Amino acid sequence: MTRILINVDIGTQALIDQDYPSTLESVDQAEASVLEVSGQAGFDEDEQHRIGMAFRECMVNAVVHGNRYNRKKQVHLRVTKSNERFTIQVTDQGEGFEVQEVPDPLDENNLLRHSGRGLFLMGAFMDDVKVRKVSPSGTEVTLVKNVEPRQ
Amino acid sequence: MSVKISTRQVGDVTVVDVSGRITLGEGSSALRDVLRDLTAKGNKKILLNLSDVSYIDSSGIGELVSGFTSVANQGGTLKLLGLTKRVKDLLQITKLYTVFDVHEEEAHAIRSFA
């Protein structure tokens, strides 16, 4: 069961605000929570699937490439919803990476690479993706899905 | 639901039936092990039946690509059968749909190896 928090100060509803250990089990648990709250937020099944895929790629990157499965390091997940957008923030405690150094997986020379599609898929399934380094070390990835006005 | 994989022989084609989720961890490693084993045993015609695969992540895509290239490097061919709409969409988004030889019907796919 996911705890619902209300942040009155900025008028945004916080749906998840939680730390996870750096394990693949955490990825599954967090994915289930994100899918649950995305459904509660009113997204249809296809959009929930896209949100879930983007989030899973993001969480895997945090656990595997960011924290490198270090159980002493946490992945922080924060999910919020306003009238305009559904926002997922995933923050790891790793060494960080340069977005511009990630090879384009659609480049003909990279098509048959084993890995390197995660960040691309996040962008494909969400309306906006932002990556920034955080202090003292770590990476914060923000995934945004716009909320369609109700008819 | 985790992944389940079984193999069967149809003529000289090895059909690999996969169901469940092909994701980082158990799912992708199980698929990698099966394809490596088939390649090591000299199987050169492999049909990967994904009709019961509900979900593939980027790690799973990576295993499909690695399987495709490793079988090709051994002089064989790996083809795909029965993609769900979501898996098909994923391969199209990643520009891999045209890399693979994809079939909708098993009999047609088997004949295509001849």
Image (spheres, coloured by chain):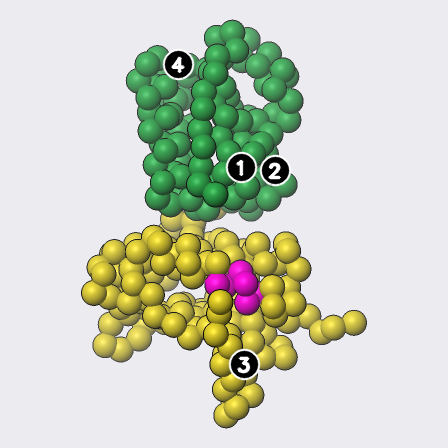
Chain colours: A yellow, B green
Point out which mark residue B84 bears: 2
Determine the CA span between mark 2 and mark 4.
26 Å
Determine the CA span between mark 4 and mark 1.
23 Å
**Residue that numbered label 4 is attached to:** B43
Q: Which mark's residue is nearer the viewer, 2 or 3?
A: 3
Q: What residue sits 60% from the left and 68% below the top?
A: A40
- Tag 4 and tag 1 share a subunit: yes
Residue B81, picture quadrant: top right
Subunit bearing disc 1: B
The answer to whether mark 2 and mark 3 are in CB contact below 8 A is no
Q: What residue sits 42% from the left and 75% below the top?
A: A17
- Tag 2 and tag 4 share a subunit: yes
Point out which mark residue A13 bears: 3
**Residue that numbered label 1 is attached to:** B53
Residue at disc 4, secondary structure:
loop
What residue span does the magenta drawing correspond to?
A33-38
Residue ranking furthest to the right:
A151
Mark 1 neighbour class, 10 Å CA radius: few under 14, some 14 to 19, many 20 or more: many
Subunit bearing disc 4: B
Please state which of residues A28 and B50 is positioned toward the viewer in this rendering: A28
Subunit bearing disc 2: B
Label 3 amino acid? Gln
Determine the CA span between mark 3 and mark 4.
55 Å
The answer to whether mark 2 and mark 1 are in CB contact below 8 A is yes
- Tag 3 and tag 4 share a subunit: no
- Tag 2 and tag 1 share a subunit: yes
